[in-house]
Amino acid sequence: MNIFVGNLPATYTADDLRQLFAGYGTIVNAIIMRDTATGLPLGYGHVYLVPEQAAYDAIVSLHNTTLKDSPLVARECVFRAHPEQRVNRLLWKGVERRVAGSRRHNGYDFPRTNSLQQYTG
């Protein structure tokens, strides 16, 4: 089971995460998520732990435990599809997002001409 681990200190490494979950089951993978631009840790990670019952025991035992003066967050990582994330997003109802008139031409209205009329006069 994939476990989300949040509120990690900046100095925490994947090896520290492995040691934290080592007593509960077999750790398949442990990663700390990092910013792609700077390489700095984002403060959360994932641990893949088997068997599933051991993962549930780890979540119950480690959730809200204090780790370097901050409460640790541990919960089951659930995959969310893109449409589910956007359920509460406001939609444009009957109103165009971009006004086609003056906004495109900075207040100047250009008459529409046929491209052939423009060159032939």
Image: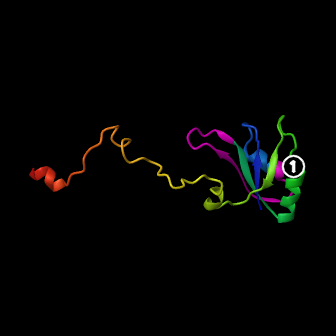
Which residue range is magenta in the image?
Answer: 20-42
Q: Residue furthest left?
A: 120
Q: Is residue 36 visible?
A: yes
Q: Residue furthest top?
A: 69
Q: Residue visible at 36% across and 45% down?
A: 101
Give the residue type that dot 1 points to: Leu
Colour approach in the figure = rainbow
Report helix, strand or loop for mark 1: helix
| Foreground of the two, 108 or 8 | 108
Q: Is residue 31 magenta?
A: yes
Q: Measured from the top left, where is residue 82 in percent x and y?
A: 61, 59
Q: Residue visible at 42% across and 47% down?
A: 99
Residue 102 sits in quarter: top left
Query: Which quadrant is the N terminus positioned in?
Result: bottom right
Q: Is residue 44 magenta?
A: no
**Residue at image mark 1:** 62
Q: Residue visible at 21% across and 51% down?
A: 113
Q: How many marks?
A: 1
- In this rendering, position of residue 107 left or right of residue 21: left
